[in-house]
Amino acid sequence: MNYLKAFLMLMFIIFISVVLFSCDSKEGADLVLLNGKIATIDKNYPEAEAIAIQGDTILAVGTTEEIEKLIGDNTEVIDLEGKFVMPGFYDSHLHFYSLGALKLKLDLRDAEYWSDIVNIVANDVKNKKPGEWIIGRSWHQEKWKEVDYISVDGFPTSEELDKVSPDNPVLLTHASGHAIIANKKAMELAGITNETVTPPGGEIVKDENGNPTGVFKEDASSLIYYAYNKYLDKRSPEEIKQTDIQILKFADEECLANGITSVTDASSSFDIIDLYKELYDKNELNVRMSVMIYESNENLNKKIADYKIIGYANNHLTVRAIKQFIDGALGSRSAWFFEPYNDKPTDIGINVTSLEYLEETANIAIDNDFQLCTHAIGDRGNKEMLDIYEKVMKQHPDKKDLRWRIEHAQHLAKNEINRFSQLGVIASMQGCHATSDGPYIVKRLGEERGKAESYVWRDLLNAGTIICNGTDAPVELVSPILCFYSSVTRKMSDGIEFTPEQKMTRMEALESYTINSAYASFEENIKGSLTPGKLADIIVLSNNLLTCSDEDIPKTEVLYTIIGGEILYQSK
């Protein structure tokens, strides 16, 4: 009996100890940010001082005094000391794989002359064995300081590349991705001669004697890529996979460092989507992804039913969109216009995909409840695509809330602007393109057309169109802050404002990079604002983007990038 009393007394003591410990221990939020300037992008309470996170979601926002009550014994607390907080940037148009792949190529963005690029290639030749390919990206002839090359159609020829790299094939992609220049060795491997016929939807640039100059626009580039891909196919499947994984991880790191918590990947194959799933399953990718499938109509018909993915891996992967192209780019003169280019009166650009084929894609999309996102830059490209959207929508009046998109929507005839809002089409635009292209728009299109039709954000906003913003990296730098700067100032590199009447307000620009981008991917209920219950995807910046001077915007640094309540990037 004494043993029983002793046992019961021991149990009572243990019970009292547990109760007392529980009373002394205070549960609370997992992470708390205090003393900040918070732009919630939520109209119900647009400003706050502090935010509390539990698990991967936002628990509360409010004053520092209110949020301090949610601090527990195990809560991580960050004193923001007045720093600016906002939802993580949602880059609505970014080429994720290409961004990472740039790390493995010659980066030509900083070249000021064609001779700079030739020297970069010459130096790389020293590190290559004969026969190895030299790959680079991001040259742009309109951004060089002078014409220091033999020019055909405004582009350099391969002659200087042939001199420095006679035994190594060279393939250099234009910044836009819509043209390449290849040297003689690469053209030999591809079987290119003056008799080679240009494939539909492309152009082989030739000199006055009919000889290929090395420049290939749009689908003509596939002739060189075919030879390059044969070279790549010599690798084992495991080598290919490991390279792809490294490329995706490079892109992930770049996005985190630039405050990007979500991206719309603007074209990936079924194979890359499979790899995304594998990496998310292993927690080896961090940035959230909404993917546009870029495959042939034949492949879409075969596989699309298996690739509708919503909120996979705890809302890290969504696939519900299809990508298409109707034309090319302004820099390569392959954007499709009604009127000829001002600096090449015989050229109106290129319709890279037939209208019949695009209509077939639109029907695949609407039949399978997929969003359609079409690259359109020239005024005719935009008009023809809106016509297809309208036709297919009218044929399916029961289909609502499609949120189909035009990617870029750069040059619009005045009578097309209202059609975006009338059809519910989203304008997926990139602020940085206006200031990047601005210096040569008038050259390409003439004064009147260039300024009246180009990057008409204010006109679209006034018409009630939803605009989502992005960098289009690696076409431009993967910097939402610089893109925001372009959106609100329209200042080009020389300080001159390009059509300043088309500026966004600062709040409009923030919304275009947060809640609008989330809406454009059907995710506004879980992302895009700092609202309790939404995902805790948050960034902390060194400057207040709503109030700092124009000059201080580009100087703004990303201090923290938080995804799902986890700090994944912190500046040193």
Image (spheres, rainbow, N blue to C red):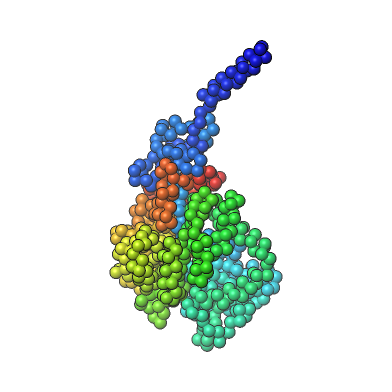
Q: How many marks?
A: 0
**Left or right: 89 as drawn, with respect to 489:** right
Where residue 288 appears, as percent x and y from the top left, is 51, 52
Estimate the x, y position of residue 271 in percent, counting from the top left: 57, 63
Q: Residue placed at 54% from the left, 75% from the top?
A: 221
Q: In the picture, residue 530 is in which quadrant? A: top left
Foreground of the two, 456 or 525: 525
> Percent from the top left, x then y, of residue 32?
48, 37
| Viewer-nearest residue: 309 or 100 | 309
In percent of width and height, residue 54 lies at 49, 39
Who's the residue at 34% across and 46% down the image? Answer: 43
345 shown above or below 368:
below
Q: Left or right? Give the position of 348 relative to 96.
A: left
Can residue 295 be seen?
Answer: no
Give the camera-side residue of 212 and 56: 56
Task: State left or right for residue 442 relative to residue 208.
Answer: left
In the rendered image, is residue 328 in sight? yes
Front-lying residue, 539 or 281: 281
Q: Is residue 245 above or below residue 115?
A: above
Residue 63 in which image quadrant: top left
Q: Which residue is located at x 49 percent, y 35 percent?
A: 29
Give the residue at the far right of this rendering: 129
Image height check: is 22 above or below 486? above
Q: Quadrant of the N terminus?
A: top right
